[in-house]
Amino acid sequence: MKIKVRFPPSPTGNLHVGTTRTMIYNWLFAKQNKGEIVMRLEDTDTERSNKEFEADIMNSLKWLGLDWDGPVYRQSERTKLYRKYLEEFLVNKKAFWCNHSKEELEVENKNQIEAKEPPRHVCSHKQDNLETGVVIRVSVDSNSDRTISFNDRVKGKIEFKESLLGDFAIARNLDSALYHFAVVIDDIDMEISHIIRGDDHISNTPKHILIYEALDKPLPIFAHIPLVLGTDRSKLSKRHGATAVSAYKNDYLPEALFNFLGFLGYTFSKDIISKEEMVAEFELEKVHQSGAVFDIKKLDWINSQYIKKLPPEEFKKLANVPELPDEAVLIVTERLEKLSDIQNFNYLWEKPKYEKDVLQWKEMKPEEIQNSLLQSSFCAGVEIKKLGSKLDEIAKDNFGGDRGAVYWPLRVALSGKKKSPDPIEIIKILGPKETKERINEAKKKLES
Ligand code: GLU
């Protein structure tokens, strides 16, 4: 069997990390089986779809390296095909025009909820053969005792009672098919073999099966994968933090986000894993059954591992810090979780800005700080290897062995920060001239 899967995003929002995780599993499955991926923008909701969201989706997919085969399809450009099948459905009485108003449906819905029945519309217009109406619905037998079942590759056997589906809507009119119809017609027309999608679509699947059957087409294989959850285990949404892939572009490497998302529903053999290794290991049947929590701390950690491996030139380009000296790249990449955190290290390429109070160590008096800085400045030219013991000596000879009395003011003079890598590391990068200048500036600050 030729394996063919699809990326079917709706351009009604930016590319969501949850949708992306689902696409990653489609991609891994397709690559592993030398199959194809169809890119299909599901823009039947013309009011909510727009070109900016479309551009965001395409750019984010490219950034992550999620490629597809063949052209980009848009459902809005395929209305003729849907129309042909809608007409066929109406002629064959597989579908009918329903003329119930929104208000009538609301009353029906309310009554069903009160009677503890699943909400659905059982239409009394089914036999009326209306020429037109509010919406086109598939005719479903509400007296049927059939159980529609399918064997889900992830969830196992799933069953639904046909009688509880109701006459579901498939088009607003002949030229505007709705999701259930457009998706099935496309999946048939594009010869999709495997439908791998979020498990929020499970309840749509029996409806889709009825459409396949009405057209006498073989069913594809379904695989419903668990949703991505926020830390409170509810469906991941904006209140948990950024949900758009594009919001992660400035801080995270695409390989790190890909690696992280791959784990949201699957356990690979090691935490840091390349795409190629994921392709080799992935098995649809081993996708987890229940939802996976989007844990930003894990993403940060994975990202830090990828940042560490970047060659200096690449890092400087991605973090947008051309002025960062090459010798400094290693000490920063070992400490960064997000690319934009590089700004905390700006003292490595420009003079630090700070208040003079920060120079104060414990109860040190201004004259003592001055003295400490003066002694340190004498060391600026000392061979790096010997610098540590020189500074320790200053502490011993002048401050009763309190190393903080030497290191603290020195660190602040060089970096403007209370926390930084070892001052000796900074001196190594700045060189003796710049080191001396910064210490002198700190001394001046104390005098002001
Ligand atoms: N366009 C749908 C969505 O974004 C995809 C539906 C499907 O995979 O069948 O949720």
Image (cartoon, grey):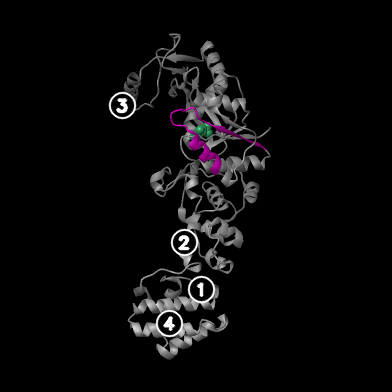
Q: Residue at image x 57%, y 32%?
A: 40
Q: Is residue 95 left or right of residue 255?
A: left
Which of disc 1 and disc 2 is earlier in sequence? 2
Q: Amino acid at mark 4?
A: Leu
Which of disc 2 and disc 3 is earlier in sequence? 3
Q: Residue at image x 56%, y 80%?
A: 384
Residue 56 within the segment the image draws in magenta: yes
Which image quadrant is residue 215 in?
top right
Q: Which residue is mark 3?
A: 114
Quadrant housing the C terminus: bottom left
Q: Amino acid at mark 1?
A: Ile
The span from disc 2 to disc 4 (Cα, nearest Å) is 26 Å
Q: Nearer the viewer, mark 3 or mark 4?
A: 4
Residue 314 within the segment the image draws in magenta: no
Q: Amino acid at mark 3?
A: Glu
Q: Nearer the viewer, mark 1 or mark 4?
A: 4
